[in-house]
Image: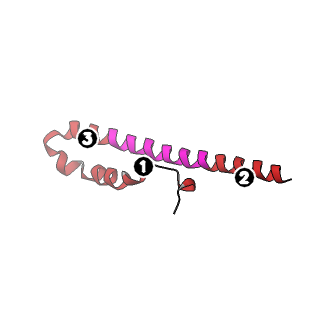
Amino acid sequence: PCAENGLLYFVALFENRDRIVRDQWVKIMKLRIVREKLTECYHRESVNHMQNCRGLVERYLKELPEAQMGGRPPFLKKD
């Protein structure tokens, strides 16, 4: 019984880690799409890009801090 509980703990731990990594990966890929749209807007609007691409820039800057991977996953951080 004790070994079974330990195994269930590690299974849950790995499933949680996989979920966190998957969620972070989705955020990164969404940010990549916004960046590609922003690049297209810069090229399309050329001299007027400051006015016409502002919404994409604001969205990109808002989502950037959320989409960065790094450090230890939250479930392994020590407080």
User: Which residue lies under the disc numbered 3?
Assistant: 41
Q: Secondary structure at mark 2?
A: helix
User: Which residue lies under the disc numbered 1?
Assistant: 67
User: Which residue lies under the disc numbered 2?
Assistant: 9
* Residue count near mark 1 (Cα–Cα under 10 Å), binned few <14, some 14–19, many ≥20: some
For marks 1 and 2, give the CA distance: 28 Å
Q: Residue at x 60, y 48 (%)?
A: 17
Q: Residue at x 49, y 44 (%)?
A: 26
Q: Secondary structure at mark 3?
A: helix
Left or right, 46 with respect to 76, comes to left
Count of all numbered marks drawn on residues in the image: 3
For marks 3 and 2, give the CA distance: 48 Å
Q: Is residue 19 magenta?
A: yes
Q: Is residue 23 magenta?
A: yes
Q: Secondary structure at mark 1?
A: helix
Q: Residue at x 42, y 53 (%)?
A: 66
* Dot 1 amino acid type: Ala
Q: Position of residue 35 (x, y in %)?
A: 33, 42
> Which circle's residue, 3 or 2, is located before the other in the chain?
2
**Image: 18 above or below 63:** above
